Image (cartoon, grey):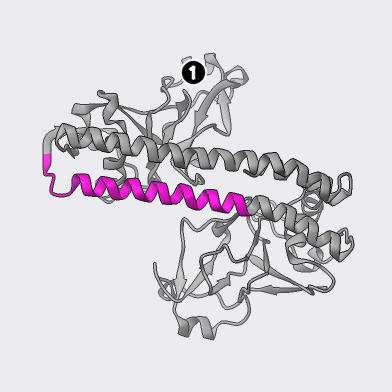
Amino acid sequence: MIDGDRGKNYPNGADFSAHGDCLFLSARNVTKSGFLFGETSFITTDKDASLRGGKVQRGDVLITTRGTVGNVAYFDDSVPFDNMRINSGMLILRTDESLLDSRYLYHFLRSNSFATQIESLTSGSAQPQLPVRDLGNALIPIPSMQEQRAIGEVLGAIDGKIAANTKLAAAADALVTTYFHQAVHGVAFSDHTFDDIAAISGGGTPSTKVLDYWDGVIPWATPTDITPLQGPYLESTNRTISQAGLSACASPLYPAGSILMTSRATIGAFALAQTPMAVNQGFIVVQPTDPTLNFWVFHEMRSRVDEFISLANGATFLELSRGNFKKFKVRLADPGAMEEFGRQAENLHAVARNALLENAKLAATRDVLLPQLMSGKIRVKDAEKVLETAVV
């Protein structure tokens, strides 16, 4: 009913490039939300032909089996790559479509029921692993093919809308970036530095030994809140602190709109705070003195990441100090041009953010429907009624 295929003969460093003929997938490309192609590696056609196993086909389901175990992705027509191969930390599941619908399998593998089974089958603490032989012992409910396909279609409609919104958000972000490049074209560096036009600050961490500092109502951002974002809009954080925790750490409560840039290890991941929040010491936080320049400064920073990295230092990991960041001179166009760009940027970022906010609602609807459909508590027709209000 299901065939498994694992990547073999892992390429060495010399086989990889930023561009190529075959996308070589690692665990970072398969997340809890499906595929993520923010960081990609490619191999040549010759190297691709020399590898055994691990070739992905449309309709395949991928599951991570090492490190982060149980993340799942579905290789359908929405994936923008035709030629992909996996590393040995993943498994390709290819179904007999006459017995098990691949989209139904994909959604079941994302259910809480399967997550519970995965937890019991996974071994190892430092490097968790899901042995392939044990995965074969997982129990899958198998309704009729008609019901499987109906479930796959109704949940797939949500996934399709999420994919369309994601593309819309990416297109809006790319367009505003293009507008910035046009606005800054030919503009020389001014005598002003970032320190001259903005407040430059950082963050801190309350003592983890004091329980009263944690699990309050104040969002507290770390770089791991930023790096998985599909757009530069930080709505919430994984951890929160109390008022006492805020008072006990080096971070103030930054207002919505503050520009957050990661400054250590991964340098140059960005977000705009969408609600007041504190941050840890892994950020440089920028607040332009003139609020109308917020998007100008944000895009100026995003266009300068390579320069920021060039002034980073550190033995264990690279870090860009606030002192070095403050010294960078900024490009400032004619006030009218910057004002016009600000209006364009505000509108396009609103489009992108709203699309991603809708995605969060759609994902929540899908996650509510998924276990109920899998268990038979609700039928597909009832789920379709719910989707009439969720999918616009």
**Any magenta on residue 188?**
yes
Residue 240, percent from left and from top: 57, 26
User: Residue at position x 77%, y 54% from top?
Assistant: 118
Relative to 28, does residue 324 appear above or below in the rendering?
above
- Say whether residue 132 is left or right of residue 377: left
User: Residue at position x 89%, y 60% from top?
Assistant: 143
- Say whether residue 239 is left or right of residue 109: left
Task: Give whichever of 258, 166 is nearer the camera.
Answer: 166
Task: Give the residue type at disc 1.
Answer: Leu
Residue 260, percent from left and from top: 39, 34
Q: Which residues are magenta?
A: 160-189
The N terminus lies in quadrant:
bottom right
Residue 294, percent from left and from top: 31, 31
The C terminus lies in quadrant:
top right
Residue 261, can we see it? no
Residue bearing the label numbered 1: 246
User: Residue at position x 51%, y 81% from top?
Assistant: 48
Q: Residues within 10 Å of mark 1 (few under 14, many from 20)?
A: many
Task: Give whichever of 256, 283 is nearer the camera.
Answer: 256
